[in-house]
Each structure stands twice: as C-alpha cells, then as structure tokens.
Amino acid sequence: MIPTVLRERLIAGDKLFGTLIVSTSPRWPDVVRGCGLDFVFIDTEHIALDRADLSWMCQTYAALGLPPLVRIPAPDPYTASMVLDGGAAGVIAPYVETVAQVQALRGAVKWRPIKGQRLGQMLNGEPIEPTLQSYLAQRAKELLLIVNIESVPALEALDDILAVPDLDGVLIGPHDLSCSLDVPEQWEHPKFLSACETIFRKARAAKVGAGIHFWGSVDQQVRMLKLGANLLIHSADITLFQKYLRTELETIKKAAGLRSVTGEAGADIKI
C-alpha cells in the first residue's frame, strides 16, 4: 500500500491494522510483511532510535508496501520535518492539546517545503497563489498527519482540533488518557470507555480517522473497533516477543515437571 491509499482508506473509515516496530534488525522487515499489516508504527517518543536507523527502517518498510507512521518525541514541527525527510509516510504527534499545535504540525507535514515567515502568513490565512496551492494540495495527499489525544485538555479541545484542515487522524494513547482521567490502566472503567467512544465518534463525524494503540486482550481490542475505531495499532514487536517467550517457556517447564515461572518475569512492557 502507498501512503496516498492509506490516507484515503483511513479517512473513508476502512479498518486498518498496524503494530509498533522497535527492532532495527535487517531480518525483521521480511518477517513483518507477511503478517497481514496495513502499515507499521515506529515510535521515537519512548524508543531510542538513531536518525540513520530510523531512516533505514522507513525506507525499507515503505519499499515493502507498509507505510511507516512515525511518532515524534513532541508535537514539534521541526522534528516532524526531519522524520519525513528520512522517509516517513506520516507523522504521529504525541500529547497534542491545542489547535495551535495542530496548525504548526499542519504547516510542517502538509505544506512542505514552505517554512519561516511565508508559512506563518499562510497559516494565518494569507491567500496562496493558485499554482502553489495546487502543488501543495497534491503533496498533502501523499503524507499523513495524525495527533495523539491522550489527556482531559485534549478531550475538551477535541472539536476545535478536529476542525483543523488537513488532519487525517487522531490516535488515543490509552495509558496516558486513562491516567489523565484518574482511572490508570482501568480499561473496563466506564469513564475510559466513554472517552474512547466520544473520540472515535467525533473523529468519524468529522471524516477524520479514529485510532488507538492498544495492547490489551483480543476482546478489548475488538471492543475498540466496535466503539468506532478504524485504525488499530496492535501491541508491539517487543511486547509480543515477551508474551510468547514467557508463555512457551512456562509450558515447557510445566511439561518437564519443573516449577511454573508465572509471576517471575518483570512487568509487561507498555509503550
């Protein structure tokens, strides 16, 4: 899939599936491309990735038809430009709470290569020469802009955020959102589920993609789709490795008559 098609399907409401990729191993892309994914999610907010490694990952997954969506460390337009230069198909900006943040990101992602004073004037509503406007409009279709909604202030500003032109999707950060709602990691709590449903419903009404990165049970993830999500980032390579290694080792040890290892491992990894 190419980024243009991913964007069109996201906005149209098609259900799209990805996972978080942490590994920079050159063996990983060939494994991942056979897993039924529509895209890959690469996180530089919580994961230490070298800029060259990140670019290699983006270029490789893009060449395999898995558009790489990269979460940057902060809602910073300069960092957004940097990861796009490295080959990202789209930018996911964390902990966005204001229209001003989305507008700045819009300028960096959708109106490349305009910068500086000219970009500020355009974002403030200055008329754009038709030839340039047509050029920018075409390029805007080739890159995705998605923002994380993961706090009470973001919920309160959601209607205004969704009204910003060129926004392609919103993505719930469940851990941060649940903590902001004072129900940390209580995925079944009515307050958390109600917030998720509100975000999904309002996003789809605005013709904006509605997503969540979730590592809960299969039933919980299916519930998110039923609540209205059409972009699901399932778990992460490191989390899935941890889960299945632990499960299989426990099975082997039990079969061999050894003590169970349940509870000996560290806490599950959440990103």
Image (cartoon, rainbow, N blue to C red):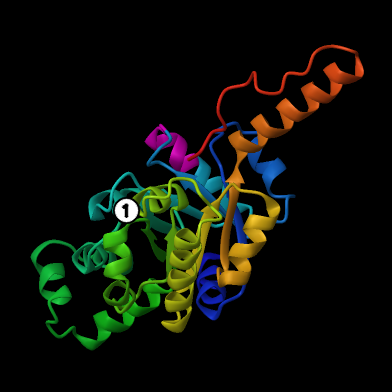
Q: Is residue 243 left or right of residue 266?
A: right
Residue 121 image-quadrant placement: bottom left
Residue 54 among those drawn in magenta: yes
Q: Can you name the residue that lies furthest to the top here?
A: 258
Q: Can you name the residue that lies furthest to the front here?
A: 190
Span of residues in magenta: 48-56
- Residue 36 percent across, percent down from the top left: 72, 56
Picture quarter with the N terminus: bottom right
Is residue 37 visible in this depiction of the protein? no
Instruction: Give the camera-side residue of 28 and 153.
Output: 153
**Residue at x 31%, y 60% (from the top left corner):** 152
Residue 11 among those drawn in magenta: no
The residue identified by callout 1 is: 95
**Residue at x 56%, y 77% (from the top left corner):** 13
Residue 172 image-quadrant placement: bottom left
**Residue at x 15%, y 76% (from the top left corner):** 122
**Residue at x 44%, y 47% (from the top left corner):** 175
- Name the amino acid, label 1: Tyr
